[in-house]
Image (tube, rainbow, N blue to C red):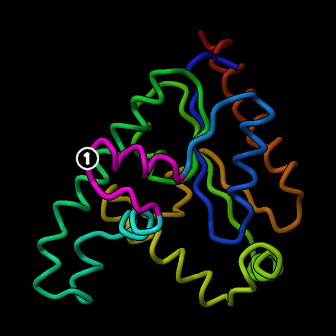
C-alpha cells in the first residue's frame, strides 16, 4: 500500500461499519480515528472536556437546534462551527503523520483533495440492523436507529453541502447484510490495492 493512504468509512447505524473500520485498520496495521477526534478538537478549541456532552453537540448544527432552543440557539452557533473547524484541522494534522483509517466525522469530505484518499459507505438492510441492535445497541428499535442516521445526514449536509449516503460521494458502497464484516473489510482493502496498482501501471 502506498505511503500516506487514507481510508475513510461512513456507515449507516447498525450496519457494523465501526467494526469494519477496526478490522481494516488492524489488517493494515494502521492508526484508526473516530470519536477521539472530538476530544482532540475540543481541546484545541478550549471547549468542555465532558465527552458525552461533546459527542451530542458535535452532531448539532445551527439549523437543527433552532427549534429546540429558540433565540438561545444563536449563542451556540459559533461553538458548533468551531467544533467542526477544529475537527477538520485535527483530521488534516493526523493525515500529515501518515496512513490512517477514519470513521465518520466528515473525513471523506475533509480529505477528498488529498492524494490516495479512498471513501467507503457501509450500509445494511433493516433486518440485519435490527438483529445487530439486539446484541450491540441495547435492542433499539428501527425508528431509533434511523433517528441516529437522520442526525448524521443533517450534520453531513450542513458542513459539506453534500448528501450523506449518496453513492456519488464514495468510491465504494458495501452492503454488510449478506457477508461477514471481515469480508467487508477485505473488500475495502482489495479495492484500495487494485486502485493503487492501476495508478502505478498508468504512470
**Does residue 49 show up magenta in the picture?**
yes
Give the residue pinned by disc 1.
Answer: 45
Residue 154 point in image, percent of width and height: 39, 71
**Residue 6, horizontal then vertical, whole percent:** 57, 32
Magenta highlight range: 35-51
State the residue at coordinates (30%, 41%).
Answer: 44
Q: Is residue 45 left or right of residue 200?
A: left
Report the side of 68 relative to 90 (left or right): left
Q: Main secondary structure of the magenta part?
A: helix
Q: Quadrant of residue 167?
A: bottom right
Q: Nearer the viewer, residue 121 or 58?
A: 58
Q: Residue at x 43, y 52 (%)?
A: 38
Residue 43 lies, in percent from the top left, at 33, 45
Q: Residue at the spot x=77%, y=82% of the render? A: 130
Q: Position of residue 131 (x, y in %)?
A: 83, 80
Mark 1, other Cα within 10 Å: few <14 / some 14–19 / many ≥20: some
Comparing 194 with 18, the one in front is 18
Extreme residue toward the top, this view: 203
Q: Is residue 21 left or right of residue 36?
A: right
Pick the quarter of the image with the C terminus.
Answer: top right
- Label 1 sits on a secondary structure element that is helix
Whether 30 is among the magenta residues is no
Dividing the image into 4 quarters, which one contains the N terminus? top right
In the foreground, 22 or 199: 22
Determine whether, in the image, residue 30 is placed left or right of residue 98: right
Q: Is residue 140 above or below residue 44?
A: below
Task: Give the quadrant of residue 137.
Answer: bottom right
Amino acid at each position: 500500500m502506498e505511503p500516506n493512504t487514507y481510508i475513510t468509512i461512513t456507515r449507516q447505524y447498525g450496519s457494523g461499519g465501526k467494526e469494519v473500520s477496526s478490522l481494516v485498520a488492524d489488517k493494515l496495521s494502521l492508526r484508526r480515528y473516530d470519536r477521539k477526534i472530538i476530544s482532540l478538537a475540543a481541546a484545541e478549541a478550549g471547549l468542555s472536556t465532558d465527552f458525552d456532552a461533546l459527542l451530542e453537540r458535535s452532531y448539532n448544527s445551527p439549523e437543527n437546534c433552532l427549534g429546540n432552543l429558540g433565540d438561545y440557539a444563536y449563542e451556540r452557533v459559533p461553538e458548533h462551527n468551531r467544533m467542526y473547524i477544529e475537527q477538520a484541522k485535527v483530521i488534516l494534522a493526523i493525515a500529515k503523520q501518515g496512513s490512517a483509517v477514519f470513521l465518520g466525522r466528515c473525513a471523506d469530505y475533509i480529505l477528498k483533495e488529498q492524494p490516495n484518499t479512498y471513501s467507503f459507505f457501509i450500509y445494511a438492510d433493516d433486518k440485519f440492523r435490527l438483529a445487530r441492535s439486539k446484541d450491540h445497541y441495547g435492542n433499539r428499535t428501527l425508528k431509533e436507529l434511523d433517528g441516529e442516521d437522520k442526525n448524521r445526514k443533517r450534520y453531513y449536509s450542513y458542513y459539506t453541502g453534500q448528501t450523506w449516503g449518496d453513492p456519488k460521494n464514495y468510491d465504494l458502497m458495501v452492503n454488510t447484510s449478506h457477508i461477514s464484516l471481515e469480508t467487508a473489510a477485505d473488500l475495502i482493502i482489495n479495492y484500495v490495492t487494485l486502485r493503487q496498482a492501476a495508478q502505478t501501471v498508468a504512470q
